[in-house]
């Protein structure tokens, strides 16, 4: 089980969403993908994508305008 | 969530081509399929070296408006059209080119970015794609 980190700091729509999807496609079942970013809407939308893809959202954290989203494939 | 988005990209304006790719890439990111059907002015953007060449749909002002918008986009961290296109391709999006536009405008296959185009087709293919789509747009 690998942990894959995706850094989307400073990126805007639709890059964080797309980079999350790209990482999830490459991940194996059970792998954890952690996305870090600053684009506010993506913090809400990445969890929507996780739900749409039928994957598990482990958690969403935010500190000082930087959010971190953990997903299990 | 399954489903599919099919978009007719009729406009070749930079901002509208952006809209098409952003919607399509969002759909792919959320697990949907996406097809872009490039026709008329939109097809110009599939010419080799043509992707970023579109004018701004409003306030182009001989290129000054576009230059200003591009500068602001860069500042905001917006991706280039080339990056959006590569992401679209990587996530399995399908690009269709209208063959009638090619005839009318004298565009040959070798003028286009053939490696990215899934099919050269007509309205029948668009309808075939769109009839199974949950979202279809004309841009």
Image: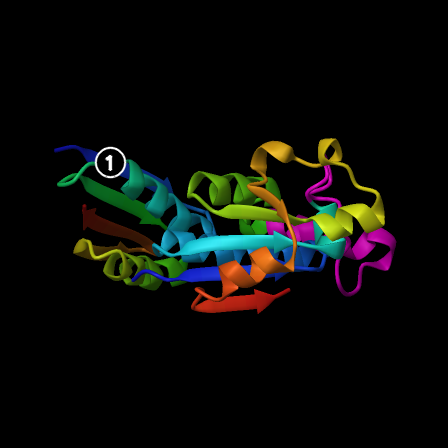
Between B4 and A28, the one lying in front of the other is B4
Q: x, y (%) of residue A49?
A: 31, 58
Q: Residue at x 84, y 43 (%)?
A: B106
Numbered range of the magenta stretch: B46-74
Q: Given the image, what chain letter belongs to the residue carrying mark 1?
A: A
Name the quarter where the C terminus of chain A is drawn. Answer: top left
Q: Is residue A72 visible?
A: yes
Q: Residue at x 32, y 57 (%)?
A: A46
Between B87 and B5, the one lying in front of the other is B5
Q: What residue does disc 1 label?
A: A4
Q: x, y (%) of residue A56?
A: 16, 54
Does B18 lie within the magenta span?
A: no
Question: Where is B32 relative to A18, above or below?
Answer: below
Is disc 1 placed on a helix, strand or loop? strand
Q: Residue at x 70, y 37 (%)?
A: B112
Between A13 and A66, the one lying in front of the other is A13
Q: Residue at x 69, y 60 (%)?
A: B10
Q: x, y (%) of residue B11?
A: 71, 59
Does B66 lie within the magenta span?
A: yes
Q: x, y (%) of residue B105?
A: 83, 48
């Amino acid at each position: 089980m690998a942990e894959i980190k995706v850094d989307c700091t400073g990126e805007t729509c639709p890059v964080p969403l797309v980079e999350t999807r790209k990482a999830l496609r490459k991940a194996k079942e059970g792998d954890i993908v952690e996305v870090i970013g600053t684009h506010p809407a993506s913090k809400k939308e990445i969890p929507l994508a996780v739900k749409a893809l039928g994957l598990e959202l482990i958690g969403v954290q935010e500190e000082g305008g930087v959010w971190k989203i953990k997903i299990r494939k | 969530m399954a489903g599919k988005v099919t978009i007719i990209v009729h406009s070749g304006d930079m901002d509208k081509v952006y809209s098409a790719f952003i919607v399509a890439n969002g759909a792919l990111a959320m697990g949907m399929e996406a097809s872009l059907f490039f026709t008329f002015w939109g097809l110009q953007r599939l010419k080799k070296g043509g992707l970023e060449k579109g004018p701004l749909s409003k306030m182009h002002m001989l290129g000054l408006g576009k230059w200003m918008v591009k500068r602001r986009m860069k500042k905001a961290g917006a991706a280039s059209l080339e990056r959006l296109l590569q992401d679209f391709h990587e996530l399995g999006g399908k690009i269709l080119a209208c063959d009638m536009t090619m005839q009318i405008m004298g565009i040959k296959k070798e003028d286009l970015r053939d490696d990215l185009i899934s099919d050269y087709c007509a309205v029948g293919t668009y309808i075939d794609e769109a009839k199974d789509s949950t979202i279809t747009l004309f841009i």
